[in-house]
Image: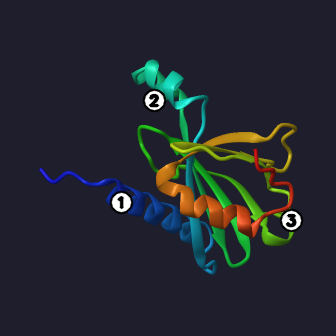
Amino acid sequence: MVQLGKTDVKFELKSKARRAVLNADPTEVPGLVLLGVSGGSQYVMGGLGVLGLLLIDTYFITVTNRSVYVHRGTRLSNSPDKLIHVIPLAQADGLVARVKWGKRQSVLRLRFPGRKRPTRMNVSYHSRDELERFVTKFPEGAVRA
């Protein structure tokens, strides 16, 4: 049995997100893909064991040449099962509400259309480069904490 490394798993998840965008709209050109998980602290969720895995959703945020696609899937499937938002780039300026940078994990809060409160996403240090590029692309409303 071949065991995949973190880089291989991350590449596979990004490929799934790009395919999901192309399935939704074949004319889009997927670019930056940011991976994150919902839920509270990784230590609390880890302490819950399998129950914690059932409570966590995986978010796939894909920036294309015209829009920002947000897919969600269960942590167990690790696939972008449901398209929850398509935000045109012209309206995506206020998408980032807050970023709390951490060594092992950063917290990204996004303002989705139609939601009163920002949605919290935990982003692993493995996706730190993508998070920095995402926040650079959509700086309005981003607060360094």
Q: How much space separates mark 2 and mark 3, taking CA atoms?
A: 33 Å
Earlier residue among tags 3 and 1: 1
Q: Secondary structure at mark 1?
A: helix
Res 69 quadrant in image: bottom right
In the drawing, does residue 102 fall left or right of residue 126?
A: right
For the residue pair 7 and 17, the one nearer the viewer reads as 7
Q: Residues within 10 Å of mark 3 (few under 14, many from 20)?
A: few
Q: Residue at x 69, y 39 (%)?
A: 120
Q: Nearer the viewer, mark 1 or mark 2?
A: 1
**Residue that label 3 marks:** 91
Q: Residue at x 38, y 61 (%)?
A: 12
Please state the horizontal and vertical placement of residue 37, each as a whole percent of the image: 56, 42
Q: Amino acid at mark 2?
A: Leu
User: Relative to residue 101, is residue 115 drawn left or right?
Assistant: right
Measured in 3D between alpha carbons, the distance from the residue under mark 1 to the one under mark 2, in whole angstroms, is 21 Å
Pick whichever of labels 1 and 2 is earlier in the sequence: 1
Q: CA distance from mark 3 to mark 1?
A: 32 Å
Mark 3 or 1: in front is: 1
Determine which of the numbered discs, if any, sits on residue 7 in the image. 1
Q: Which element is circle 2 on?
A: helix
Tell which circle, 2 or 3, labels the residue nearer the N-terminal end: 2
| Circle 1: residue type | Thr
Q: Residues within 10 Å of mark 2 (few under 14, many from 20)?
A: some
Quarter containing the C terminus: top right
Asked which secondary structure carries label 3, the reply is: helix
Q: Position of residue 52 (x, y in %)?
A: 48, 24
Which one is in front, 15 or 135? Answer: 135
Query: Please, what is the three-letter code of the amino acid marked with disc 3?
Result: Gln
Residue 11 in the image, given as x and y percentages of width and height: 40, 63
Tell me if mark 1 has few (under 14), some (14-19) or many (20+) residues whose alpha carbon lies within 10 angstroms of its own: few
Q: Which residue matches tag 2?
A: 53
